[in-house]
Amino acid sequence: MRSEDLPVIGQLPLFADMDEEHFADLMRAAYLQTFPPQVDLISEGDRADFLYVVVEGCVELYARSNGREATMSLVRPVSTFILAAVLKDVRYLMSGRTTEKSRILLIPSEDIRRAFRQDDAFARAIVVELASRYRAVVRDHKNQKLRTGVERLANRLLVIERDQGGKGRLTLPYDKRTLASLLGMTPENLSRAFNTLKPYGVEVSGSEIRLTKAGDLRGLAKPNELIDDDTDGPVG
């Protein structure tokens, strides 16, 4: 860890209220590294040796089983991933890889657990982080259980359009394979869902999408703040 990086890291919500001595101890064996796109960081089934904090860029968390692969979440700054595995000293349930050039802070798991025991402010920050992750997972579970694939797609498009300025157009922040996986759909089902949304003013040209009948689309999607409000932090 370079000395010039320490003030920036110290301002992150997870570390901001830590005792200075405990923070210095935690950073002693940590390092901030830049990774190119498509670098594997963790593999499901391995032991949780480090806590990862995404400072810049994006990390895709994904899982595989029975020859299938699914994107579970996209982690963007500033957020941790596999925090629960680190605290419990257990194996990763997901794999992770960068999707773009990313700066990531790595902190040995043993040091995290020691700081959790020693520093009350750090422990509280971890509890808040875990609570936010849990609420995000519940919202995603409700989205999967209570909506059809077409409704999930419609709501996701409305959220992306809102986040990109609410001007009736949007650029998908990831490819359609990833979008399908995040929505719990196959690429084929996603393509059919886009066709279903054409009468509701959804015009697709590659990754560029126009929403020409936003009112009609909202009528179909029926946005729900108890599902779509991402103030706790998005799952993906």
Image: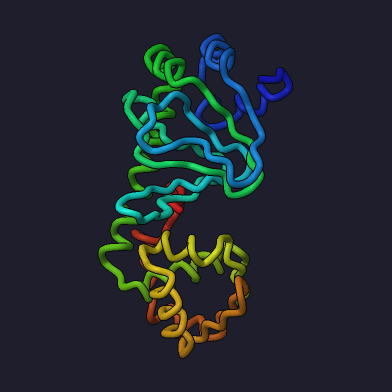
Residue pushed farthest left? 145
Residue pushed farthest bottom? 199
Q: Residue at x 52, y 82 (%)?
A: 202
Q: Quadrant of residue 165?
A: bottom right
Q: How is the image coloured?
A: rainbow
Along the horizontal axis of the image, is 28 left or right of 177? right
**In-front residue for pair 76/181:** 181
Q: Residue at x 38, y 27 (%)?
A: 47
Residue pushed farthest right? 4
In the picture, which quadrant includes the N terminus? top right
Establish if 110 lies above or below 71.
above
Q: Residue at x 59, y 34 (%)?
A: 104
Residue 121 appears at what percent x and percent y?
A: 44, 21
Q: Quadrant of residue 129?
A: top left
Residue 127 appears at what percent x and percent y?
A: 37, 31
Q: How many marks?
A: 0
Establish if 99 lies above or below 225.
above
Q: Residue at x 46, y 53 (%)?
A: 236
Residue 119 appears at what percent x and percent y?
A: 43, 15
**In-front residue for pair 23/27:** 27
Residue 211 appears at what percent x and percent y?
A: 55, 80
Q: Quadrant of residue 204?
A: bottom right
